[in-house]
Image (cartoon, grey):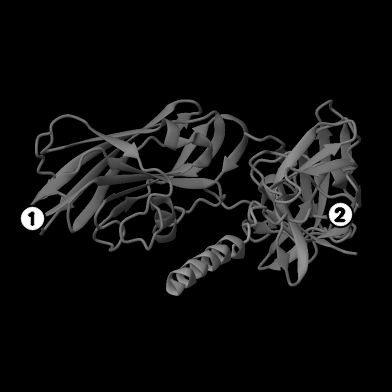
Amino acid sequence: MIKKIAIAVLGLLLAAFVLYSCEKEQTTLPTEPIKEIDGTWKIVSALRNGTDMTNRFDFSRFRITFSGNAYTVTNPVPFIQEGAGTWTFDDPGYPFKMNFQENGGAAKSSEIQYPVRNGKRNIVISFSPGCAANTYQYTLEKEN
Amino acid sequence: MMLLVFVMGCSMTIENVIQPDTINGGETLVSTLYVKLTTNTEQTSKFMIAILVPKMWNAREHATITFTSDITSGPQKMTAIPVGTPAPQADGLDWPAKLAATIGNGGNLINDWEWVAYYSDADYKVVGNVEVNAVVTVSIPTTEDNISFKMGYVAANSTDGLSGTDYYGSYFPGCLRVVGTGDLIDFCNPQLSSIEPRTSLDNDIITINFDAGVIANPLANASDIYLCASAITTDGETIDACAATEKTKLTSLGAGRFRIECWPRDYFAVPAGKTLQRLEYFFTNADGSIKVGYGGGISPFIYTFNCK
């Protein structure tokens, strides 16, 4: 009799342990931080149709400044847009494209890469400012 | 399908190519290749023909290649090999890349050419110790572009590829003149001056090259070369930039070669709303007393902005 009671108590304890030891599985995914690019960026690498033009043409004074969703360009070089305007990522968490809307002009978008090189965030942007067959690729690095 | 005893083997040569010296732009270029194959081993392969063409013709889409042989019946069809398809024994390179690496550019001096490779639609079984002759007909619709170009042809098979010089034949029949419209695009002859990219608009960055040693000219021994250029807009306005300054000075690359990088819209301060139609330019010495134009003479070099 005592033995039966003991077995029953053990069974109840085991059931209680199983029921209350399991925690509810966390199903929410961690969120990717939104990419912040506010600040002034410069060109550190420029390719034209795969040819390195970085030291052949003066890209050194070009700057693009992002502030919120606005951008401005100083000391222009051939670029996806000529003048200032607004910009957006296609996906702020996982950007694959960057859209530039020039003030009073048409929007243009570019596929981008967003790597970290030498500890610094880069934006690699590709576009064709002239003939569509001529592709330029600029690597931008944040200056400040 | 009838089993065709088509000889592919250890030795393949292009004995001759019949190709016109000159055609009019827009006409179809028809070339005939005479190919001889000899074997000493049995093999089953596809026949491969490759053509070296200017990219502007888009030959991959428009050209047709067929062949006959003394042991096949009727014209045999060939189909362009998709880019990216690995060539045999080529370490992963596709046919265009392997042809470019092994055969080269045929002497074309403007980097706007391509190899386009074709396989026979059928596989052919080869027996050993025979010789077979094939006649290949290549038809390529040309464009209206005014060009001189060095065509090239290669014959090989899908088993041996370009893995040995006996396994393929190549033939370069010389400079083809296509009489078309617009500025002459001369792939054949060294040029005193050339501009890269070959096609551009005024918002591209262009590289203007000067090769002072190509032909005799008054600047052949100059150490400092300057660009003297006029930009003509689509509405007929002329914007000049001819002063010898740091801005117009070319960079020396050695061996008499010079170049200058130019963003035309900025270089000529083109007003908003205007577009450049062409450049007319010369090269000068520092004080402008010597001026060299097209062919080393007094007429300007001309570059027309377009994307064609």
Q: Of label 1 and label 2, which has the lower sequence position?
A: 1
Q: Determine the chain carrying the residue at label 1.
A: B
In the rendering, at what x and y percent does residue A131 appear?
69, 38
Look at label 2 and name its amino acid.
Answer: Gly
In the picture, the quarter occupied by the C terminus of chain A is bottom right
Task: Identify which residue is drawn at 38% across, 35% down.
Answer: B20
* Secondary element type, mark 1: loop
Q: Quadrant of residue B199?
A: top right
Mark number for residue B288?
2
In the rendering, at what x and y percent does residue A45 appear?
74, 61
Alpha carbon separation for disc pair 1 and 2:
70 Å
In the rendering, at what x and y percent does residue B171 appear?
34, 50
Circle 2 crowding by C-alpha within 10 Å: few under 14, some 14–19, many from 20: some
Task: Identify which residue is drawn at 62% across, 57% down.
Answer: A25
Front position in the image: B235 or B67: B67
The residue to which callout 1 is attached is B128
In the rendering, at what x and y percent does residue A136 appear?
70, 50
Q: Is residue B286 left or right of residue B111?
A: right
Q: Is residue A55 positioned above or below B44 on the image?
A: below
Front position in the image: B110 or A74: A74
Are tags 1 and 2 found on a single chain? yes
Look at label 1 and name its amino acid.
Answer: Gly
